[in-house]
Image (cartoon, rainbow, N blue to C red):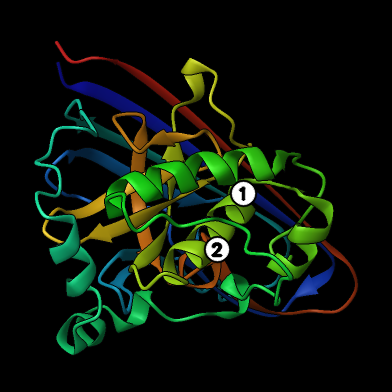
Amino acid sequence: MPLEYSITYKAKNTYEEAVHEAYWQFLIIPQENESQQFIGVDFANTIQANNEYSINGYGFKTIRVHPKQKFNDIGFEANFKLIKKEINPFDFEPEQNIERSYKKIQELDFKVDHEAFLKTTHFTSIPEQKTPLFQWNTSESIFDNILRLNEYTYSYIRFNADATDVHTTLAEILKIRQGVCQDFTHLFCALVRMHGIPARYVSGYLHQGNGYFGDSQMHAWAEVFVPYVGWHGFDPTNNILAGTNHIKVAHGKDYKDCSPLKGVVYTAGKNETVHSVQVSSQNQQ
């Protein structure tokens, strides 16, 4: 049965000195796709600055705000309603020929087609290790290896919302073995790409009513392209496949491509930003 989701995103920015000019881009609108259908979108800010809607380089909707008056604080609130079909993440035809799949990822055309999601980035760079972090088994299918990797990442890092921030690299994560969904996803993507499999970082919302790990802001998981199967979502923070409770906003190579808020602010002094996200659902009547 389809579910109706209500999502409220809030952000408040406070500045010690008056802001003379500012530019923001929000990447927070749920994607419309085969399983997600919009009912309504509402976005407002506390100083009545104009909102403009645009499309980013990956084809996802953004909201741009450019206040034209001075201010010391500004609040943003977005409300989304959408209908999402129930998803069975295991509803697909498994790889029929394991050897054929491994040959496919070695083909030049495959590497060119998926180049963006095979690259190592600043946030998916793993320092050289004395022993491999994860043992890949070529006698198993690519999908089964990735399923094991999902569990491995979940076990390797302990969820701790205070341990890292948006600038934390994998070199630091491997030392402290603690972090949030962003860190789980960066490590997972790095290890998938290391074996020649395309992986993309996904940002979105997670309905946590079933006790899933997440934080008070947006959630992150990964999508992996399995030859002859297609793109599939994996959530290493919770050791599950992405399903009905995962509401996709955007994807990219890493967090930098999917940051929910980017901006340039012209001011002096200190500033503080507070974010919150609430997700609720009910069966569609």
Residue 13 versus residue 148: which sits nearer the camera? 148
Q: Residues within 10 Å of mark 2 (few under 14, many from 20)?
A: some
Q: Mark number for residue 234?
A: none
Q: In the displayed image of the protein, which residue is found farthest to the front?
A: 139
The spot of residue 112 in percent (x, y) is 23, 87
Q: Are marks 2 and 1 in contact (CB under 8 Å)?
A: yes
Name the side, left or right, on which 272 lies relative to 166: right
The residue under label 1 is 11
Instruction: Choose the circle earlier in sequence order: 2 or 1.
Output: 1
**In which quadrant of the rendered view does residue 113 lie?**
bottom left
Q: Quadrant of the N terminus?
A: top left
Q: Is residue 150 above or below residue 7?
A: below
Task: Give how far across and how far down residue 100 sits, in percent.
Answer: 13, 65
Residue located at (51% from left, 38% from top): 151
- What residue is pinned by disc 2? 261
Residue type at tag 2: Leu
Q: What residue is at 51 percent from the left and 74 percent from the top?
A: 66
Q: Secondary structure at mark 2?
A: strand
Q: Amino acid at mark 1?
A: Ala
Instruction: Tell me: residue 129, above or below residue 3.
Output: below
Q: Which quadrant of the rendered structure holds the C terminus?
A: top left
Where is residue 87 drawn, in percent x and y? 20, 30
> Mark 1: which secondary structure?
strand
Residue at position x 59%, y 35% in the image: 214
